[in-house]
Amino acid sequence: MSEILKRLSLNQITLNRFTLKECVEACVRQNLGWIGPWRNKVADLGLAESARIIGDAGLRVSGLCRGGYFPAPTPATRRRQIDDNLRAIDEAATLGTDTLVLVCGPAPDRDIDAARGMVADGIAAIVDHARASRVKLAIEPLHPMFAADRSVICLVDEALELANRFDAADVGLTLDVFHIWWDPQIYRKIAACAGRIFAFHVSDWPVPLPGIFAARSMMGTGVIEIHRLRKAVEAAGYSGPIEVEIMNEALWAREADDVIQEMKQTFAEFV
Amino acid sequence: MSEILKRLSLNQITLNRFTLKECVEACVRQNLGWIGPWRNKVADLGLAESARIIGDAGLRVSGLCRGGYFPAPTPATRRRQIDDNLRAIDEAATLGTDTLVLVCGPAPDRDIDAARGMVADGIAAIVDHARASRVKLAIEPLHPMFAADRSVICLVDEALELANRFDAADVGLTLDVFHIWWDPQIYRKIAACAGRIFAFHVSDWPVPLPGIFAARSMMGTGVIEIHRLRKAVEAAGYSGPIEVEIMNEALWAREADDVIQEMKQTFAEFV
């Protein structure tokens, strides 16, 4: 296997209609080394059983998707979100990964600045538990098309500024090419993230987009300079697993082995 | 009529299924002072006839949509785009507006940096003709969701940096709340545009978005702090017409007078 393929991790949502068990079995058949599960799929199977089947299969867990969603309208609802993030940290630790991806969440009203403050407060409220659990928090700046419904944190420099309020061992970034490729300063911004990149995700941006949430496509079918971005992320010090995370209705209709085979081929060619 | 309603301009695409003549007649019935036509609708009616009916109705033209689309794969195709922009400048002058909105266009391949260079070259190739025609070029930074298919220029500061290569009397910006609201530095960036804001467009960002191109909604139905943005644009020196530009399938199905009445009411309340 080529060196780069050893870094390929299947992000669970790429095979969204399958259970975690089915995904693990497909990874084993296709000789992958890494998987990135989603919490809802882990919950379906049970946390202990999920950890067991992943471990028994010899897979490593690249990261857990996802914590975050900190902004909420009242102190009580914000507290509930923090409690959920504390549970997500525990789940990550049990699954044997040191990385929890944070999708920060939308604003509860029109005050996006206030919501950004709630994100900072939320991270501050969970960082001690994360450190004690040996889990790093990886803030994922999301594409601005998701600013109203998924993440008030959109830009790489904005996410870095937020991460910089905390220790570099505890809080860093998830960089996903789909979210960041268009930024005119992206290479300068990635370089500035040196030491804070905890996760790297790939997919492509097709034209036209087939949807909004389910918008992505297989590597090589869109406009993103994936290889150039991967090299930039490596130059900034990241050499860990690379998750393939593709939300796409047509892909979700296909068989697991078929998708993984195409993923391996396009990963080797375009990442 | 309140002072702010005197600044309301109907961007033609808000009434997309109607002819320019029908839009002009509806504006007159609803007592609007401004209209912002699109070139395809002007072409349908003929340029001279379009200028005549707008003038006879006593309407002023806030701006012409749109020039731009500079990047193209070969020198010959880039030349054709420049020629088209020269015609757009002539059309703007004939229609009696001093503002041509520039939607810069997508990259012809994966090299978005090169495409940005083609945009700068394109503007440089038309700016003398624009000045001679007393038409200002108003670069519109588009939301990053359109980076692959409509504009490689996405951020306000990026558009300003591009405009700053030219004289402030010739090249500036169109600011549209739909494209810029999510930027964490937007108020600082708008202030930095002082003297370069040539046009201001409003609409709203609904959750969930009903589409990608046809994504917008009537003011007050989404998450954008429209009034705060309008005040910021004014503080940066812009006191001209404010176009309501809404691409929305449900809105397009409605009657012209009905849409304009709702537009006036929500404009007075939320802009």
Image: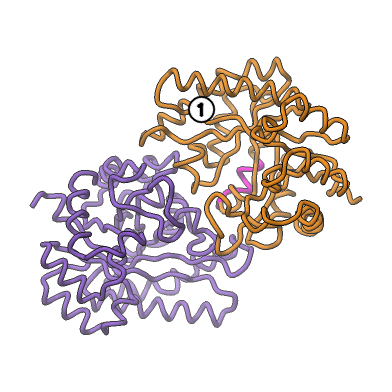
Chain colours: A orange, B purple
- Residue sitting nearer the eye, B229 or A232: B229
Total numbered badges shown on the rendered structure: 1
Tell me: residue A27, above or below residue B10: above
Instruction: Tell me which segment is drawn in magenta.
Output: A183-191
Q: Chain of mark 1?
A: A
* x then y, percent, for residue B200: 29, 55
Residue placed farthest to the right in the image?
A1
Which amino acid type is marked by label 1? Answer: Phe
User: Is residue A57 placed above or below B268 in the rendered structure?
Assistant: above
**In this picture, residue B54 sits left or right of residue B235:** left
Residue A44 rendering spot, x and y as whole percentages? 68, 33
Q: Residue at x 54, y 56 (%)?
A: A211
- Residue B7's image quarter? bottom left
**Residue at screen point 26% across, 63% down:** B254
Residue for badge 1: A70
Helix, strand or loop for disc 1? loop
Residue under the point 28% across and 45% down: B220
Is B202 placed left or right of A236 in the picture? left
Q: Is residue A190 magenta?
A: yes
